[in-house]
Amino acid sequence: MLTAPRTTRDTMNADQNPTQDVSILIVEDEQDLLELLRYNLDREGYQVTTAASGEDGLKLVRTQRPDLILLDLMLPQMDGLEVCRTLKTRQTTAAIPVIMLTAKGEEADIVRGLELGADDYVTKPFSPRVLMARINAVLRRRETEGAPDAGRVIEAGSVSIDRDRHEVRVHGETVLLTATEFKLLALLASKPGRVFTRQQIIESIHDGFAAVTDRSVDVQVVALRKKLGDGGQAIETVRGVGYRFRE
């Protein structure tokens, strides 16, 4: 099922309602929950588009580029993990933030979702207020990435990180990273030699809201190292503490 975008508070201008130009795609097959999510997002002034299957969600992303996606894990046919994997492996959609919604709360599910590039993970049942806080936190991080002081290029050995273009190169070759992997790399490389604890990493790239464990940070580092090839050797493990980028 596809539905056209809906907006509310049409009489408010952009200064009064900064969410008015922000579009959110909900991919959820439970009709009651979908309507509840749409109602709360409409009330906050977001532009809302909905899809009841993973396939329909991907079709909408091709024609409309949402600012954020709420993605249910347990979808018919193509599940949320496969949808997330597809989004994060396409260069045109890899940077779109994804918040996964699911009734599963085991650590393995959380790690898997984050490993695929999800920006946050919310387990059902959840408070609409908590979900709105998570959405706002993810969108704030996205705005911060586009701030003037985040636009400089970081050169670290064979690795080049352009935060303005959201682009990473190793030996001059482009490396496609998920939004979470990019934030993790930029954080470590921005201060070579400094040790970041796992908790500091969680607070920095997830604003402390995400249901993230120390184990999930380790999984993200392993995935990042693999994608960077020999450039990943610059990410060092400080046993019992966390990680640092070699000076």
Image: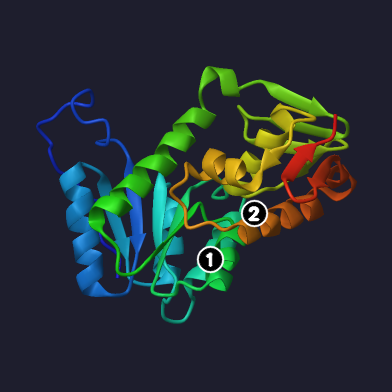
- Does the image show residue 34? yes
Looking at this view, is 205 or 13 the one in front?
A: 205
Q: Secondary structure at mark 1?
A: helix
Q: Nearer the viewer, residue 54 or 180?
A: 180
Q: Give me the residue at 37% from left, 48% from top.
A: 134
Q: Is residue 113 above or below residue 151?
A: below
The x, y position of residue 105, in whole percent, is 45, 71
Q: Quadrant of the C terminus?
A: top right
> x, y percentage for residue 38?
22, 57
Residue at image point 46% right, 81% down = 77
Q: Position of residue 73 (x, y in %)?
A: 44, 71
Residue lying at the far top of the rendered structure: 148
Specify the amino acid type for callout 2: Val
Marks 1 and 2, Cα distance to the nearest angstrom? 11 Å
Marker disc for residue 110: 1
Say which of 24 and 3 sits in front.
24
Classify mark 2: residues with Cα within 10 Å, few (<14), some (14-19) or many (20+): many
In the displayed image of the protein, which residue is found farthest to the bottom? 77
Q: Is residue 221 left or right of residue 5?
A: right
- Between 247 and 178, the residue placed more toward the observer is 247
Corner quadrant of residue 13: top left
Question: As shown in the figure, which amino acid type bears the numbered disc 1?
Answer: Ile
Specify the farthest residue to the left: 11
Disc 2 on helix, strand or loop?
Answer: helix
Image position of 221 with respect to 11: above or below: below
Residue 143: image tag = none
Residue indicated by mark 2: 217
Decide which of tag 1 and tag 2 comes sooner along the chain: 1
